[in-house]
Image (cartoon, rainbow, N blue to C red):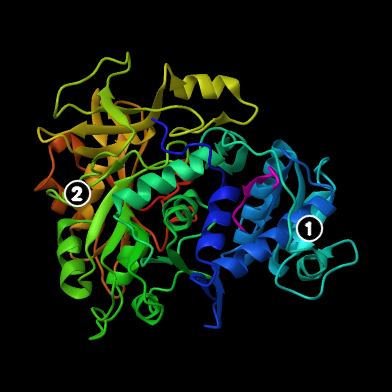
């Protein structure tokens, strides 16, 4: 299904700048609550400067360049400026380690990196080990070492007028690295068409209009903020209020202050919001819809509605296939489900041989689409992984789901999160849901640990709410009354925190590698 035509990120942005030059596109609030505002016309001029700056530094069509930045307007200028000349943005998490950055910069063949002052030392450390990295640029500062360029000086010298280009919608515009588990991260190649496709799907699924404004608190280096917020706003001519970072204490104040109408969250920041003291002004906002991923408990859904009154809509997506599922806005909304297939997608639940399974039977979710449009173009320099993931037009997600009789899909677990216990499959997410219902529990992560008799044993790592106390037996007893015997954890350990990704997902591969610490 072609819902893109011949559009590119350049043509979409320039259309909005030409037809609504004085309309606000971007509001940015930093951690000190200082605010910058740009119209579409102003934003496009700075993007042109960024494009000309890259050209002046020798960046050519097809070249990869790294953005090692927290949320800031410069991220958007450089991403879209690079896209205008056919260069490919490679975003990375500012808290990445030197080893992680060395691998990504080398593997991606990035020719330059733009970073912020607190990350300059790390980038200077690894740049000598990255053979393609020619330039290091410091952002949002007027001071830098001699071997580092200053972004603000480069932009000032660049022209706001940009010459023509030979872009096509199948040219690459971004390469987002997936989190590594047992293997190195893979670079997901996204074309101009990929970005516009998800922008169209998201804007239609959210019923977005030019009068809507996204509240963006999730990191721009992650697909969520790029796909669902930035691109849906851009294709429809809406606006976005970008926060430097997520703040649970200021979230609804920011939504109110900037007139936001839609937002995107994950379960972890939602739990942080629910843990905040109640405020009479929590419901004083214009949020008509908050899309989210990763389940909460039924009690948490009820508490969210009571306290905040911001309607929720669960969606599902991956870096490789951005938005194949969403709950419908005009039909029964089952927010315990990941929804139904969105426009342009087909989905099935299959067994290991690819045979479709009946409703109610868990299996792997596969999604049909066209690579370079609704599906990623492929993994950079990894044809084997691409061929294993996309087979005959179907992308194998690695997620176990089931479909109910009404056609809604329900997330069960990541395939790698299934625990094999005495021949029985235990879905970690099912055990976590039960544990998270305990009144003293803030969050939990369930993993399999080696067992000489049963292959794996079920282990629950638990974070208690502030000020609460419990014993491992309290948690085990709670589960005994709510789970089949073979699903009840044999071990419970209490933790202060979990290792998480940039959007709050628990990094279970790290927990599995650490194993139990000895208390149970």
Image point (40%, 65%), residue name: 214
Which dot, 1 or 2, sits closer to the camera? 1
- Splitting the image into 4 quarters, where does residue 180 fall? top right
Image point (34%, 77%), residue name: 252
> Magenta span: helix, strand or loop, mainly?
loop
209 left or right of 431 in image: right
Image point (58%, 33%), residue name: 170
If you read the primary sequence from the N terminus, does the residue marked by circle 1 or circle 2 appear first? 1
Total labels: the figure holds 2
Q: Position of residue 423 (x, y in %)?
A: 24, 22
What kind of element bears circle 2? Answer: loop
| Residue closest to the eye, 271 or 245 | 245
Q: Which mark is residue 314?
A: none
What kind of element bears circle 1? Answer: helix
Q: Does the magenta stretch include residue 63?
A: no
Instruction: Identify whether 393 is placed above or below 518.
Output: above
Asked if residue 460 can be seen in this view, the reply is: no
Q: Where is residue 90 in the image (x, y as percent from the top left)?
A: 64, 46
Image point (43%, 48%), residue name: 199
145 left or right of 452 in image: right
- The quadrant the N terminus occupies is top left
149 left or right of 15 in image: right
372 left or right of 280 in image: right
| Residue closest to the eye, 158 or 312 | 158
Q: Residue 336 carries which label?
A: 2
Q: Name the residue under label 1.
A: 53
Q: Position of residue 57 (x, y in %)?
A: 84, 52
Q: Pointer 1: residues within 10 angstroms few (<14), some, or many (20+)?
A: many
Asked if residue 393 can be seen in this view, the reply is: yes
Q: Give the range drawn in magenta.
A: 85-94
């Amino acid at each position: 299904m072609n819902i893109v035509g011949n559009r590119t990120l350049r043509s979409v942005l320039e259309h909005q700048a030409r037809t609504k030059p004085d309309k606000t596109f971007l509001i940015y609030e930093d951690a000190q609550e200082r605010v910058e505002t740009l119209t579409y016309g102003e934003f496009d001029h700075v993007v042109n400067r960024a494009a000309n700056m890259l050209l002046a530094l020798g960046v050519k069509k097809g070249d990869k360049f790294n953005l090692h930045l927290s949320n800031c307007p410069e991220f958007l200028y450089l991403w879209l400026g690079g896209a205008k000349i056919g260069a490919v943005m490679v975003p990375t998490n500012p808290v990445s380690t030197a080893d992680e950055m060395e691998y990504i910069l080398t593997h991606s063949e990035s020719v330059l990196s733009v970073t912020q002052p607190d990350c300059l030392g790390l980038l200077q450390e690894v740049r000598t080990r990255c053979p393609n990295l020619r330039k290091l640029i410091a952002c949002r500062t007027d001071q830098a070492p001699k071997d580092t360029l200053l972004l603000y000086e480069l932009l000032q010298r660049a022209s706001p007028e940009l010459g023509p280009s030979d872009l096509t919608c199948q040219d690459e515009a971004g390469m987002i690295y997936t989190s590594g588990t047992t293997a190195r991260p893979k670079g997901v190649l996204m074309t101009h068409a990929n970005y516009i496709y998800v922008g169209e799907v998201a804007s239609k699924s959210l019923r977005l209009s030019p009068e809507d404004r996204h509240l963006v608190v999730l990191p721009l280096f992650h697909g969520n903020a790029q796909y669902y917020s930035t691109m849906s706003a851009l294709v429809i001519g809406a606006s976005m209020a970008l926060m430097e970072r997520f703040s649970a204490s200021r979230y609804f104040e920011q939504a109110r202050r900037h007139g936001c109408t839609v937002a995107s969250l994950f379960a972890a920041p939602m739990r942080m919001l629910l843990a905040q003291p109640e405020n009479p002004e929590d419901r004083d906002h214009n949020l008509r819809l908050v899309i989210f991923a990763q389940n909460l408990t039924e009690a948490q859904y009820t508490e969210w509605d009571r306290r905040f009154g911001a309607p929720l809509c669960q969606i599902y997506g991956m870096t490789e296939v951005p938005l194949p599922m969403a709950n419908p806005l005009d039909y029964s909304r089952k927010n315990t489900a990941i929804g139904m297939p969105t426009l342009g997608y087909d989905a099935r639940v299959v067994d290991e041989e690819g045979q479709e399974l009946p409703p109610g039977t868990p299996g792997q979710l596969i999604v049909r689409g066209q690579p370079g449009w609704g599906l990623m173009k492929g993994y950079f320099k990894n044809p084997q992984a691409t061929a294993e993931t996309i087979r005959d037009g179907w992308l194998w997600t690695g997620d176990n789901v089931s479909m109910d009789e009404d056609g809604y899909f329900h997330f069960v677990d990541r395939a790698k999160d299934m625990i094999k216990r005495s021949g029985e499959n235990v879905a970690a997410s099912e055990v976590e849901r039960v544990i998270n219902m305990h009144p003293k529990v803030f969050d939990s992560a369930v993993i399999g640990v080696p067992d000489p008799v049963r292959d794996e044993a079920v282990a629950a790592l638990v974070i208690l709410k502030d000020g609460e106390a419990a014993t491992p037996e309290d948690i085990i007893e709670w589960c005994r009354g709510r789970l089949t015997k073979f699903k009840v954890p044999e071990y419970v350990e209490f933790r202060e925190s979990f290792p998480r990704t940039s959007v709050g997902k628990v990094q279970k591969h790290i927990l599995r590698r650490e194993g139990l610490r000895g208390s149970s």
